[in-house]
Structures are given as C-alpha cells and as structure tokens.
C-alpha cells in the first residue's frame, strides 16, 4: 500500500513535515490571532490509488485546496480537511458568519484557500530547502466533494492512475481535533527524482 522506508528515510520525511508544519503554525497563528499547536505529523509515502484509505475512505467528504506545483519538482499539492475541521477553522477565524463547509460564503471560501495556501507553501518551502530544489505554486483553488472526486482532478491532470505521493497528516490546535492532510503528488519524472533524493529505489 505504501513504499517500505528505512528508519532514516522515514525520519527525514518526518523532519521535513515537522519543519513545514511548524512554519505553518506560525503563519496560521498570525492569521488567527492566537497560538496554534500542530503535532508531529505522520508522514507516509503512499501509492496514489490508496490515498483515499488514509483520509477516511473514498466517500469521505473533504474541503480540498488544490495548488499546481511548479519548478524543479512539478506536480500538484492538495490540502484537505474533513467537514468538522473546516468548520472549526472557519469559526476560529471569527469572520462573523456561521461556518458550514457545504454552503460556504465567498469570504469563507477565500479564507480556506488562504489557509491551504499557507500550509502548502510552508511544507513545500521546507521540502525545497531540504532537497535544494526550486519549488513554487500557482494560486489556490477550492473544491468540496467526496475523496474519490477530489483525487480525480490531479489524477486526470497528471495522466495516470497510480504512482507515489507524499502524505502528511497533522492535527491542529490545542484540542487536537482538527485533522488536516497535505498531499504532494509529483509528476512521474519528479517522483523518480524525489525518490532518488530520499535514497529510495522506485523499482524495488
């Protein structure tokens, strides 16, 4: 279901995820006006056709922010929240409107896009620094749909049914109830390049 990594390889990916989510916590704290706690994330190298198993199953409804990844490691990055997490994030922004992720106002959509942009940017910045690769992103887009539908977008864009993706699961805030996911899906060529940087043989 996912590539078997050595302890050192797993430790490296977790360190990158920790640095990225740490940067994101600082940026989100400034945005929300309160201290933000993000736990040490769980990081896995997952085959793309099994990603939905890690986010609650193919019928799990997610609020998903998409960004195109450009530069030396092109692909797509997704920042995903389940419904309760999306609603709590919007409530914590205190923008004066009841949060309902299934019926978002334009202001709420903009807020979720900005949160996704912060999280994706923080993670990719850490990944780029570690791998010495130039990485930057497009403007974010938002969709609220079942996991299978959410994942079909990058699957169609990248023209394949499977390959490897880096999946980061982290919990936000002191109550540890807001679960978000960051999924980096590199193009096939970028995936091979990234795996070589991590010392993983993609053909094993």
Image (tube, rainbow, N blue to C red):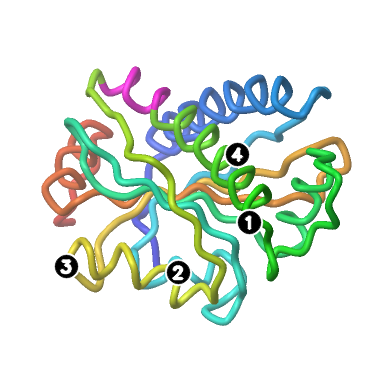
Image quarter of residue 82: bottom right
Q: Residue at x 47, y 37 (%)?
A: 120
Magenta stretch, overall SS: helix
Does dot 4 land on a helix, a strand or a loop?
Answer: helix
The label nearer to you, 1 versus 4, is: 4
Classify 10 Å Cα crowding around label 3: few (below 14), some (14-19), many (20 and above): few
Residue underneath mark 2: 150
Residue 187, magenta (yes or no): no
Asked if disc 1 and disc 2 are in contact, CB closer than 8 Å, the reply is no
Indicate whether 114 appears above or below 15.
Answer: below
Mark 4 = which residue?
115
Judge the density around disc 4: few (<14), some (14-19), many (≥20) Cα neighbours within 10 Å. many
Residue closer to the observer: 194 or 1 = 194
Question: Which residue is the site of mark 1?
Answer: 81
Q: Earlier in the sequence, mark 2 or mark 4?
A: 4
In space, the residues marked 1 and 2 are separated at their CA atoms by: 12 Å
Q: Position of residue 8 (x, y in %)?
A: 41, 31
Q: Spatial distance from mark 1 to mark 4, Cα to Cα?
A: 11 Å
Q: Is residue 171 above or below residue 9?
A: below
Which span of residues is magenta-colored?
Answer: 125-131
Spot occupied by residue 109 in the image (x, y as percentages of width and height): 61, 52
Residue at numbered disc 3? 159
Q: Earlier in the sequence, mark 4 or mark 3?
A: 4
Q: CA distance from mark 2 to mark 4?
A: 18 Å
Instruction: Using residue 68 as the reference point, say whether residue 201 is left or right of it.
Output: left
The alpha-carbon separation of the residues under discs 3 and 2 comes to: 15 Å
**Side of 202 where 21 appears, left or right:** right
Question: Is the C-beta separation of discs 4 and 3 under 8 Å?
Answer: no
Label 1 Cα neighbours within 10 Å, binned few <14 / some 14-19 / many ≥20? many
Q: Are marks 3 and 2 in contact (CB under 8 Å)?
A: no
Q: Secondary structure at mark 1?
A: strand
Spatial separation of the CA atoms under disc 4 and disc 3: 28 Å
């Amino acid at each position: 279901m996912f590539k078997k990594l050595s302890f050192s390889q797993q430790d490296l990916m977790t360190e990158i995820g920790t640095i990225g989510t740490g940067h994101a916590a600082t940026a989100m704290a400034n945005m929300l006006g309160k201290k933000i706690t993000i736990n040490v994330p769980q990081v896995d190298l997952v085959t793309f056709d099994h990603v939905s198993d890690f986010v609650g199953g193919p019928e799990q409804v997610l609020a998903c922010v998409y960004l195109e990844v450009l530069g030396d490691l092109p692909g797509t990055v997704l920042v995903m929240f389940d419904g309760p997490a999306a609603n709590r994030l919007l409530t914590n922004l205190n923008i004066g409107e009841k949060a309902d992720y299934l019926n978002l106002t334009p202001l709420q959509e903009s807020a979720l896009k900005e949160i996704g942009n912060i999280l994706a940017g923080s993670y990719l910045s850490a990944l780029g620094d570690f791998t010495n690769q130039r990485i930057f992103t497009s403007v974010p887009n938002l969709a609220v749909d079942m996991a299978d539908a959410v994942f079909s977008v990058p699957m169609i864009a990248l023209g394949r049914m499977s390959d490897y993706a880096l999946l980061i699961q982290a919990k936000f805030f002191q109550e540890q109830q807001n679960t978000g996911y960051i999924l980096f899906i590199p193009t096939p060529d970028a995936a091979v390049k990234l795996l070589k940087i991590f010392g993983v043989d993609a053909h094993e």
